[in-house]
Amino acid sequence: ARAPQAEASRAETHDVLVYNQVIGELGINAGSKGEKEIYRRMLGRHLFTGDDHFPSTNRKYTLDPLRDDGEVSLVCSDVEGIEWIPLTEVAYFWGGAQGEIEIRRAGDIFEALKTREMKIHQKARIIGARFRVKFSDSKTPRSVYIRPPNIAKFTRDDDGRLVEEWLGKRGFSKTRSAEPDEAVPAAVAG
């Protein structure tokens, strides 16, 4: 007697592509880096200006403005819908054989540093930052966490548009804005 052969089964998967028309950004969730690269190039080629319409780099966020501009990097008066933003947490990577990470927390990091006549560390790499954002339509501030190169965590998805606008204006985000005269499809689905 022969043993029945096991059938190979493969779960059905779906790739997801989201185009944010406001900031001209393409988000891709696919099975592999190669698949993401194909989507990026083909959508750029067939729906926009060419293969390189969407940059291939995944380095979207930087926290350098915290070091370079200090408190000025938190200005939000030019973003309608956001009232104030203090920095409440910063994570430094010091490197070394043990990969030392230092996390500093305060209700307002810059105010805490001022009281001790200090500034953001100039030598350590900043690998994460948390901000408390007071939105005009809410009584309670909400948390926003940025971790370069490409992670932003919002308490609510609806916060994304305003936070991305602020991040772009202060130099935390390297986004490509859609050109006003570009032909942009309202939605792409397949």
Image (cartoon, grey):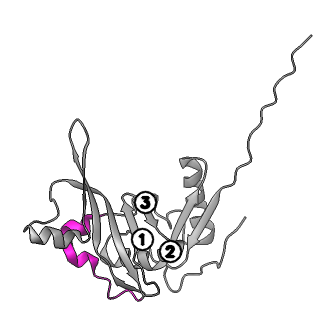
Decide: is 62 above or below 134: above
Q: Is residue 32 above or below residue 150?
A: above
Residue 183, image quadrant: bottom right
Q: Which residues are magenta?
A: 63-80
Give x and y (percent) for residue 3.
86, 16
Please state the total of marks drawn on the protein image.
Answer: 3
Q: Earlier in the sequence, mark 1 or mark 3?
A: 3
- Residue type (three-letter) at the residue carrying disc 1: Thr
Task: Based on the picture, tell me whether residue 188 belongs to the magenta stretch.
Answer: no
Residue at coordinates 42% horizontally, 71% vertically from top-left? Answer: 175
- Estimate how packed mark 1 is, as few (under 14), some (14 to 19) or many (20 or more) residues with alpha carbons within 10 Å: many
Q: Nearer the viewer, mark 3 or mark 2?
A: 3
Q: Mark 2 highlights which residue?
A: 24
Badge 1 is on which residue?
175
Residue at 65% x, 56% y: name it.
15
Q: Residue at x 84, y 22 (%)?
A: 5
The answer to whether the residue labelled 3 contacts the one labelled 2, judged by CB atoms less than 8 Å apart, is no
Q: Earlier in the sequence, mark 3 or mark 2?
A: 2
Give how far across and how far down residue 107 sits, in percent.
26, 70
Q: Quadrant of residue 171?
A: bottom left
Amino acid carrying label 3: it is: Ile
Question: Residue 64 vs residue 121: left or right?
Answer: right
Q: Main secondary structure of the magenta part?
A: helix
Q: Are marks 2 and 1 in contact (CB under 8 Å)?
A: yes
Q: Is residue 4 left or right of residue 122?
A: right
**What label does residue 190 carry, if any?**
none
Distance in Å between CA atoms under marks 2 and 1: 7 Å
- Quadrant into which the C terminus falls: bottom right
Residue 181 spot, x, y in % from top left: 53, 86
